[in-house]
Image (cartoon, grey):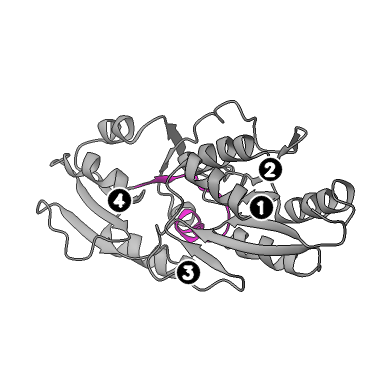
Amino acid sequence: MMAGKPMKVLVLAGTAEARAVIDGLRSTDRFDITASLAGATPNPAPLPVPTISGGFGGAEGLAAHCRDQEVELLVDVTHPFARQISRNAKDAASHAGVILLRYERPPWLPEDGDDWRSFKSWQDMADAIPSASHVFLAGGTQSIDVFTKRDDITLWARALNVAGRSGPDNVTFINAMPSPSVAEARAQFSQAGVTLLCCKNSGGDASFAKIAAARELGIPVWFLARRPDDGTGAAGQKSLEKFQIHDSVEQIVLAAVNFASSHLNR
């Protein structure tokens, strides 16, 4: 690409941080930005850049798109548990010969008095629940079937796309996004008599209200642990020639600006 021409950037979005990254990149004239949404969230808020919906059909499709559209920088700001998308991004960047920056959101950390446990799988977690527990599950649709097999607990399962879903009498489905209100989450847990919260350790602010509410009420929290990073390194500032992982929006934007300046003289 010619010096002085904006760098073509594809942002794999779907998180609040992705919007912040896009805003940061838009604050300079170095970038021609397109975003992509995989479609996991119904009716997402529009992004301020051209947006592709529905994904690319795996790593090969993403690599082909990068080549066809002359994408020079791929920025992965997807959910920390969207591991397949991140693997596809890494493979696609390698095959297409483009730079990859990945945002790795830091996990939540316990404080004094927290009763937290981590599990390698939803099955392990569900199997460990004591009989007669009142469980609030916020693990997404992929976690629900494992927990509904437990007929000796009372279960509230919150996820998207469960409207109208039926299940055993001991299960209540809540079709909703995470509430940003600690007071609302606290009232919900108190009214239901929740004795255990089961969820992903997603990190960030968007879904932290349930963690804060559980902390205030002294409710144990069981997390699905994040899987090891399939050979790409831990969160932080891992750096390779064409692949970096950063754990803040500011670092991602700065890395993009540095690439545009040093690699392409922009």
> Nearer the observer, disc 2 or disc 4?
2
How far apart are the alpha carbons under marks 3 and 2? Answer: 40 Å
Q: Is residue 187 left or right of residue 204?
A: left
Nearer to the camera, 156 or 10: 10
Q: Nearer the viewer, mark 3 or mark 2?
A: 2
Which amino acid, mark 1?
Answer: Val
Which residue sits at x=65%, y=49%? 74
Secondary structure of the residue carrying tag 3 is loop
Question: Which residue is at 88% across, 53% downward?
Answer: 261
Q: Earlier in the sequence, mark 2 or mark 4?
A: 2
Q: Is residue 182 above or below residue 215?
A: below
Q: Note whether 16 is above or below 232 in the view shown.
A: below
Circle number at residue 71 = 1
Q: Quadrant of the C terminus?
A: bottom right
Q: Give residue 135's position: percent from left, percent from top.
A: 28, 48
Part of the protein shown in magenta: 197-213
**Residue 210 horizontal side relative to residue 132, left or right:** right
Q: Earlier in the sequence, mark 1 or mark 4?
A: 1
Question: Which residue is label 3 attached to?
Answer: 181
Give the amino acid type for the residue marked by disc 4 in the picture.
Thr
Residue 124 x %, y %? 32, 29
* Residue 227 among those drawn in magenta: no
Closest to the camera, between mark 3 and mark 1, is 1
**Can you identify the residue that label 4 sits on?**
141
Q: Is residue 159 left or right of residue 68?
A: left
Q: How many marks?
A: 4
Q: Secondary structure at mark 1?
A: loop
Earlier-in-chain disc, 3 versus 2: 2
Q: CA distance from mark 2 to mark 4?
A: 33 Å
Mark closest to the chain's N terminus, 3 or 1: 1
